[in-house]
Amino acid sequence: LKPRPNMLQKNKLSLSVQYPDKRLQDIVTRPKLRSWVKAALLAPAQITLRFVDAAEGKDLNRNYRGKDYATNVLTFAYTENEDSDTTQADIILCTDVLQLEAAEQEKSVEEHAAHLVVHGVLHAQGYDHESDEEAEEMEALEIEILADLGFRNPYINL
């Protein structure tokens, strides 16, 4: 696992939070979201987090990934130049899927939301899990970041 020295420093963050689906607005608050995003940042970022219902989540997943179902988190990374020092992304969280998965995994909605936000922010910065090696690196980072935030390993009891 590579050290994450840049994550230990404070990176500038421009964060927009949208709740067209308002069900989690009082549980997954803007201050919590900001702390979760900042914990996963390697560089300055401009990020929008959007909480949507299953219908919008399904539409986005179908239109952009060709998959006809709502998924827990979608990351749209816009940083065109890899030399750019600012990460730009929209991260879409589907409330219906998030709540269902949290119940199935016997986690709180807050705990699962923190994991999905960290996961999405890492995707926005170029991390992926297409190969076993990439998946191991990304999961190890998620576990470390979530532990720093006071959350348990999200991959236990899955």
Image: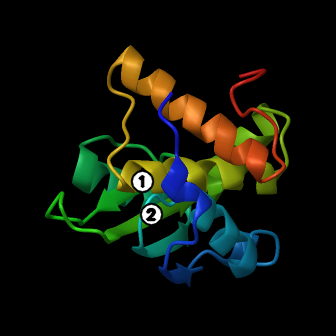
- The residue at 45%/75% (across/down) is 48
Q: Position of residue 151 (x, y in %)?
A: 81, 45
Q: Secondary structure at mark 2?
A: strand
Q: 14 left or right of 8?
A: left
- The residue at 81%/77% (across/down) is 26
Q: Earlier in the sequence, mark 1 or mark 2?
A: 1
* Residue 131 to residue 63: above or below: above
Quadrant in which the C terminus appears: top right
Q: Secondary structure at mark 1?
A: strand
Toward the top, the furthest residue is 132
Q: Position of residue 90 (x, y in %)?
A: 39, 68
Foreground of the two, 51 or 157: 157
Q: 116 left or right of 50?
A: right
Real-space Cα separation, disc 1 to disc 2, in angstroms = 6 Å
Q: Position of residue 94 (x, y in %)?
A: 56, 58
Picture quadrant of residue 113: bottom right
Residue 87's mark?
Answer: none
- The residue at 67%/39% (across/down) is 144
Residue 74's mark?
Answer: 1
Which three-letter amino acid code belongs to the residue tagged 1?
Answer: Leu
| Mark 2 residue crowding within 10 angstroms, few (<14) / some (14–19) / many (20+) | many
Foreground of the two, 73 or 123: 123
> Which residue is denoted by mark 2 in the rendering?
91
Q: How is the image coloured?
A: rainbow
Which three-letter amino acid code belongs to the residue tagged 2?
Answer: Ile
Residue 73 visible, this orientation: no
Q: Position of residue 41 (x, y in %)?
A: 50, 60
